[in-house]
């Protein structure tokens, strides 16, 4: 895994040069397809483009984008069947490096990034490679730390029940059914 991380990091250093951006993205996407539980790839060049996180429940993966470019990916563990992680589009509402659960016996939730006020968050935790949480998205610890460092309050997190083709950000994931319906209605009205 360490070799994959360093190879991707070296490739990501080239992302600053547009001609090489797709090579780094391909390396990250390729590595993401075969990640073992509790593993990740990180190649973020640290640009000023906004960060978007897409979590695919069926793939048990998180994809991190700078603008439209894939810069990192990780295995995740989402909510188990009776405590499913809700799909949707969320802003990061709160961040806390040393958060403790107020629902589950003060369980540690390091690098917590809150998505809902009723207990759903991204955080470091046990990551067996299948849904095993109480609804949160558990991340490998080092990945959670890196993600915590590059996101801001208000950064967008999409949780989807779709498989994701990670190479570039799919903007249709950033639009709810209601938003699409409103857009079509406005277009029909000539606005």
Image (spheres, rainbow, N blue to C red):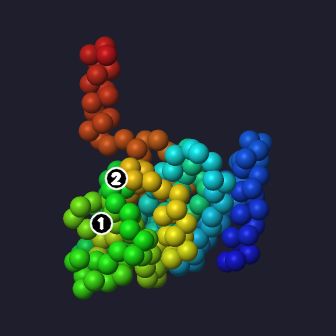
User: For residue 105, what is the image quadrant?
Assistant: bottom left
Give the class, few, some or many, for how many residues have Cα within 10 Å of label 1's Cα (few <14, many ≥20). Answer: some
How many numbered tags mark residues here? 2
Sequence-first tag of 2 and 1:
2
Q: Is 130 placed above or below 8 here?
A: below
Tell me the quadrant of the picture where the C terminus can be found.
top left
- Quarter of the image that includes the N terminus: bottom right
Position of 184 relative to 143 (above/below): above
Viewer-proximal residue, 181 or 1?
Answer: 1
Residue 118 lies in quadrant: bottom left
Q: Position of residue 155 (x, y in %)?
A: 42, 51
Q: Which SS class for mark 2?
A: strand
The kind of secondary structure element at disc 1 is loop
Q: Which mark is residue 55?
A: none
Say whether residue 94 is visible.
yes
Separation of marks 2 and 1 at Cα, in angstroms: 10 Å
Residue closest to the eye, 47 or 184: 47
**Residue in the picture at 52% in, 70% down:** 145
Q: Which residue is mark 1?
A: 120
Image spot of residue 186 (x, y percent): 28, 22
Which residue lies at the image location 28% right of the left edge and 83% below the top edge? 106
Q: Which residue corresponds to mark 2? A: 90
Depth check: 107 or 99 in front? 99
Residue at image position (37%, 56%) is 92
Residue at (27% x, 30% y) in the render: 182
Which residue ends up furthest to the top in the rendered image? 190
In screen coordinates, is 162 left or right of 82? right
- Circles 2, 1 touching at the beta carbon (< 8 Å): yes
Residue 103, image quadrant: bottom left
Residue 37 in picture, x, y percent from top left: 53, 79
Locate residue 170, reporting x and y percent: 50, 45
């Amino acid at each position: 895994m360490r070799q994959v991380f360093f190879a991707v990091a070296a490739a990501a250093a080239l992302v600053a040069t547009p001609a090489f951006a797709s090579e780094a993205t391909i390396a990250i996407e390729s590595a993401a397809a075969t990640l073992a539980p509790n593993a990740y790839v990180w190649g973020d060049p640290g640009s000023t483009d906004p960060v978007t996180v897409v979590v695919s429940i069926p793939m048990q993966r998180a994809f991190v984008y700078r603008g439209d470019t894939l810069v990192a990916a990780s295995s995740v563990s989402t909510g188990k069947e009776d405590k499913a992680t809700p799909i949707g589009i969320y802003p990061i509402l709160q961040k806390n490096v040393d958060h403790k659960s107020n629902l589950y016996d003060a369980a540690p939730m390091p690098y917590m990034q809150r998505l809902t006020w009723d207990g759903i968050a991204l955080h470091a935790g046990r990551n067996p490679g299948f849904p095993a949480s109480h609804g949160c998205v558990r991340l490998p610890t080092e990945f959670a730390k890196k993600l915590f460092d590059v996101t801001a309050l208000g950064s967008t997190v999409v949780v989807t029940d779709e498989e994701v083709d990670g190479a570039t950000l799919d903007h249709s994931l950033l639009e709810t059914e209601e938003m699409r319906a409103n857009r079509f209605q406005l277009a029909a009205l000539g606005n």
